Image (tube, rainbow, N blue to C red):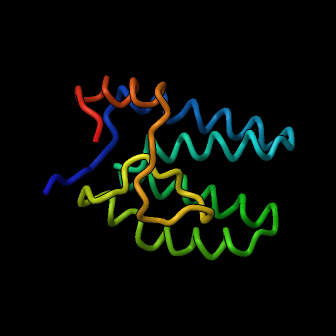
Amino acid sequence: MKLHWSMPTELKAYFGDELVKYKLAFTQNQLHLAWSHLERAHIIGQAFPKEHSLVHWKMLLFGFKIKNWKEIRGQILRLIFGGVKSFVGTIPIGNTGGANVPALLPMEIPEDIKLILKGKDGAVG
C-alpha cells in the first residue's frame, strides 16, 4: 500500500491553476465553467489528502451556491471519506468528484491531464 503525504511540487502548479480558473469563472457567474475547473482540480489532486479534501470543500460550497441538495449531501460524504482514500492510495482514478457520478467509479482521464500526471512519476494509474 502506497501512502500519499503531499502533492509533488510539479503538480501543485497545475492544481493551483485549475483553482484560480475556478475562482475567476465562479466570480463571473460562469458556473458551468467553474464546475469544470473543480472537476479537473479533483482529478489532479485526488491522490493527495489535503488537495482532495480542499476540492471537495469547494464543491460543497458550490453546491450551496447553486442550492443543489444532492451535491451538498454528496460532498459531505466525500469530505468524510475522500481524504482517507487518498491517504492510503485507494482512489477511483479519473473520477471527477461530483455527486452526479458514483464516488468509486473510475473514469477516463482527459488527455492533457494524463500528460500532467505522467510527468509526475512516469505513470498514470
Residue shown at 43% from the left, 60% from the top: 105
Within the image, what quadrant is residue 37 found in? top right
Within the image, what quadrant is residue 24 found in? top right
Rendered location of residue 20, percent (x, y): 64, 34
Name the residue at the right extreme: 29
In this rendering, the answer to whether 74 lies above or below 1 is: below
- Judge left or right: residue 105 versus residue 68: left
Rendered location of residue 77, percent (x, y): 51, 75
Number of marks present in the image shown: 0
Rendered location of residue 9, percent (x, y): 35, 29
Residue shown at 16% from the left, 52% from the top: 2
In this rendering, the answer to whether 119 lies above or below 94 is: above
- Judge left or right: residue 86 versus residue 109: left
- Judge left or right: residue 12 versus residue 34: left
Residue shown at 64% from the left, 64% from the top: 60
In this rendering, the answer to whether 78 lies above or below 112 is: below
Name the residue at the front extreme: 108
Residue shown at 46% from the left, 44% from the top: 43
Rendered location of residue 56, percent (x, y): 55, 59
